[in-house]
Amino acid sequence: MDKKGLRIAFFGDSLTEGKVGASYFEILRQKLPEHELFNYGKGGDTVISLHRRIHKIGWNVPLDLGFLWIGTNDVLVKTSWFLPLRKRLRRQPWAKSHAQFREYYRSLLAELLNKMPFIFTLPPLLIGEDINNEWNVELAELSRLIRDISLPFPSVDFVDLRESFIQALKSAMVPSVIPKSIFRKILDILSAQNPGERLHFTIDGIHLNKAGASKVAEVLWRKIDAFSPGYPIP
């Protein structure tokens, strides 16, 4: 397989879809004109709803490489009384336990490997930029779970994307975004009432701003650039 002309698919939620905030996918698309990139992100997706959705995707072309980035909404749904209702209305059920998350994620990974020879898995990123809040502690647990699920698959490589953000935020002054107010904050930003000031990588504690999208794109670009039939490459 030549490094030129790869067909690369990206699976995930709104961070991949890129319709709220800045889009890492669009940055990659501009940086990698020699490759064909496919965006299969959908806002609000959980590990269960994405698992169901992949069966409805029309696989019209063979794929060489995939990126799987899911899990944030399985934790975010716990931050507000309103979000579970919204998830039910949108038919996006979430994992109720780590055991259920593990079951669906492993099955999702196996399904995707039937469609492409290699996949990079990414951990959920942030819920608020205070890395010590309870939701980011839970995302850290999901990150370890995804890493452990990925390890037994020889054609899967876990990319610790979250760690680079955590290291940068450890020494940064960040506002304490209260998770219960995140959905209200998103609505404020979308209506231009709140520009998301003082946040470093996100517009609302979750969705990427330009700096966050650029950071994600840089990490993924390096993985794509190094990819070959003999991957991993140092």
Image (cartoon, rainbow, N blue to C red):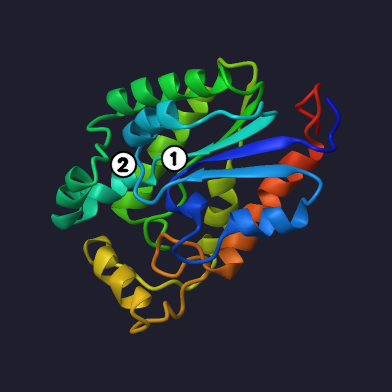
Q: Residue at x 77, y 51 (%)?
A: 32
Q: Position of residue 94 (x, y in %)?
A: 26, 37
Image height of 27 relative to 8, above or below: below
Element type at mark 2: helix
Q: Residue at x 58, y 41 (%)?
A: 160
Q: Residue at x 70, y 35 (%)?
A: 7
Q: How far apart are the two marked residues, 1 and 2, measured between alpha carbons?
A: 9 Å
Front residue of 14/185: it is 14
Front residue of 147/46: it is 46
Q: Position of residue 83 (x, y in %)?
A: 20, 53
Quadrant position of the N terminus in the picture = top right
Q: Is residue 151 visible?
A: no
**Badge 2: few (under 14), some or many (20 or more) residues near its Cα, within 10 Å?**
many
Cβ–Cβ below 8 Å for labels 1 and 2? yes
Dot 2 corresponds to which residue? 74
Q: Residue furthest bottom?
A: 193
Q: Position of residue 173 (x, y in %)?
A: 48, 73
Dot 1 corresponds to which residue? 70
Q: Position of residue 99 (x, y in %)?
A: 30, 23
